């Protein structure tokens, strides 16, 4: 029983807002740097247009037809064995797991917004500031994690229309404006042509099999696939929305922003002689030091950049919380306030442990085997839960739901040929490709070395 639905534009913005996140602006540029540039970008683009769009459309369809939280949607749509298929809704909780570290990282970004006017003098100073912050400054990190938690729940508690749609209506256009503005500035730098080369020159010799796996994994994460965020949003779609078009728009917006962010960051890096491969510290370490070289303009660029990053993070964070909130509302008949508090405090409390896992005092206690708790959360979700969610949805729509029902909705929207191609890829290519990547990431089979 939904009260208020998205408007068409609201849905597109909210789904794009979910997709465009830290993955685009923070992660995409640094993995592109790490895995060698052009050829990596190429593989990423192929995956996202073939497998990404295909499964995204399936996820939208389940939400649109199921009209409820993830668990109930699977239950509603399964022709038989409903009791088994409802477990497909497990994905409603993957978002909470992602949030336990996502919120902490948005907290770091908040901290950097305030640091925009006292930038470090060199990369090494920047690096030690970042590392000290992570390993010793528990109070500040906790304060910002708390603020992120409060912002996210205060949006989600207002519901789809009054909270999530509104947030995206303001933040997404602002985010786009800021990024395009910084991009135009980057365009004027000499480093831009080098950046362009780096991102689009197909240097196959640099492409490792590991890079392919990372590209596919990231394609999932970046368009918010496989954890019911898009599914839950789609349950609040107005009638007669073209799902096919919507999925294309979301993927195009997401990809455009990732490419824009990459081109911009690398232009700055090349201009000031840093190496592109700087790992996760690219945005938090290299960038502040580079902005510092630009004097007052650099302070403003830093401020705008970190604000846009925070916006991107927040619009994704609400989409990570909503699936579990909707679940508690539909299945346990909680009101929205209680449901939001329950789901919100779960990620907030576990998030404290992910935060502590990076600190000197607690890292020992919070390291299990090869990874600390923070990295385990990241790894478990992106290597296992998201791909699994993707496979489950592909199989569900491809093999379990009656073809006629699927066809009756999608064929008029996409035409006969595209429908047939989509259906084929959904059944036979996407699940196998994802399975292959998942087994690799989990180390069950090994393509690398
Ligand atoms: N897509 C977001 C990003 O690129 C992260 C995200 C939000 C996400 N919702 C999701 C990832 C759902 C997977 C599933 O940062």
Image (spheres, helix red, strand yellow):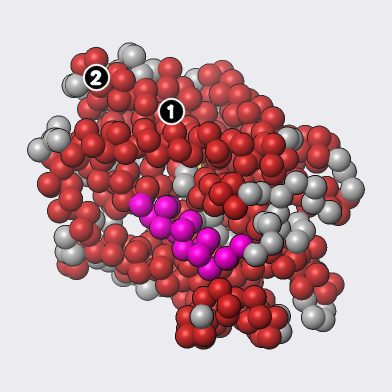
Based on the displayed image, in which of its 4 quarters is residue 113 positioned? top left
Asked if 276 appears above or below 399 in the picture, the reply is above
- Residue 449 left/right relative to 444: left
User: Was residue 248 drawn as part of the magenta stretch in this picture?
Assistant: yes
Based on the displayed image, in which of its 4 quarters is residue 210 positioned? bottom left
* Residue picked out by circle 2: 297
Q: Earlier in the sequence, mark 1 or mark 2?
A: 2
* Residue picked out by circle 1: 307
Specify the segment rendered in magenta. 241-256
Q: Nearer the viewer, residue 431 or 158?
A: 158
The extreme left residue here reads: 190
- Point 45% across, 38% down: residue: 173
Q: Nearer the viewer, residue 307 or 158?
A: 158
SS at badge 2: helix
In the picture, the quarter occupied by the C terminus is bottom left
**Image coordinates for residue 99, horizontal then vertical, percent:** 60, 42
Asked if 52 appears above or below 361 in the picture, the reply is below
Asked if 247 appears above or below 123 in the picture, the reply is below
Q: Nearer the viewer, residue 351 or 4?
A: 4
SS at badge 1: helix
- Assign the magenta stretch its main secondary structure: helix
Q: Residues within 10 Å of mark 2 (few under 14, many from 20)?
A: few
- Point 84% across, 72% down: residue: 83
Q: Residues within 10 Å of mark 1 (few under 14, many from 20)?
A: many
Q: Nearer the viewer, residue 421 or 112?
A: 421
In the picture, the quarter occupied by the N terminus is bottom right
**Image coordinates for residue 286, horizontal then vertical, percent:** 27, 32
- Residue 1 left/right relative to 52: right
**Image coordinates for residue 439, horizontal then vertical, percent:** 50, 71
């Amino acid at each position: 029983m939904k009260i208020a639905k998205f408007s068409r534009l609201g849905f597109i913005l909210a789904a794009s807002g979910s997709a465009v996140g830290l993955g685009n602006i923070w992660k995409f540029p640094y993995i592109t740097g790490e895995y060698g540039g052009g050829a990596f970008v190429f593989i990423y683009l192929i995956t996202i247009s073939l497998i990404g769009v295909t499964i995204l459309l399936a996820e939208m369809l389940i939400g649109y037809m199921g009209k409820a939280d993830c668990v109930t949607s699977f239950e509603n749509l399964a022709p038989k064995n409903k009791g088994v298929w409802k477990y497909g809704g497990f994905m409603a909780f993957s978002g909470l797991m992602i949030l336990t570290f996502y919120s902490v990282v948005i907290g770091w970004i908040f901290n950097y917004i305030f640091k925009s006017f006292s930038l470090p003098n060199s990369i090494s100073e920047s690096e030690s500031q970042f590392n000290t912050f992570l390993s010793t400054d528990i109070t500040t990190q906790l304060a910002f994690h708390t603020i992120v938690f409060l912002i996210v729940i205060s949006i989600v508690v207002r519901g789809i229309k009054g909270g999530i749609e509104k947030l995206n209506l303001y933040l997404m256009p602002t985010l786009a404006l800021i990024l395009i503005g910084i991009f135009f500035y980057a365009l004027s730098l000499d480093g831009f042509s080098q950046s362009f080369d780096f991102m689009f020159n197909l240097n196959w010799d640099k492409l490792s099999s590991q890079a392919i796996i990372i590209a596919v994994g990231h394609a999932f994460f970046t368009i918010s696939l496989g954890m019911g965020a898009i599914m839950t949003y789609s349950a609040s779609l107005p009638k007669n929305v073209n799902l096919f078009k919507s999925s294309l728009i979301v993927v195009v917006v997401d990809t455009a922003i990732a490419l824009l962010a990459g081109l911009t960051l690398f232009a700055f890096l090349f201009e000031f002689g840093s190496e592109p491969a700087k790992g996760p510290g690219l945005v938090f370490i290299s960038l502040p030091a580079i902005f510092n070289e630009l004097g007052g303009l650099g302070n403003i660029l830093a401020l705008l950049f970190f604000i846009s990053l925070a916006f991107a993070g927040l619009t994704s964070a609400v989409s990570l919380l909503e699936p579990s909130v909707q679940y508690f509302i539909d299945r346990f008949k909680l009101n929205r306030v209680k449901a939001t508090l329950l789901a919100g405090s779960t990620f907030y409390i576990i998030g404290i442990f992910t935060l502590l896992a990076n600190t000197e005092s607690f890292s020992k206690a919070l390291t299990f085997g090869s990874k600390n708790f923070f990295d385990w959360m990241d790894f478990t979700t992106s290597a296992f839960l998201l791909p699994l969610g993707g496979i489950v949805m592909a199989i569900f729509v491809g093999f379990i739901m009656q073809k006629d029902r699927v066809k009756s909705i999608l064929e008029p929207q996409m035409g006969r040929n595209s429908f047939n191609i989509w259906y084929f890829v959904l059944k036979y290519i996407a699940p196998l490709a994802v399975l292959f990547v998942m087994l690799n990431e989990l180390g069950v089979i090994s393509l690398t070395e």
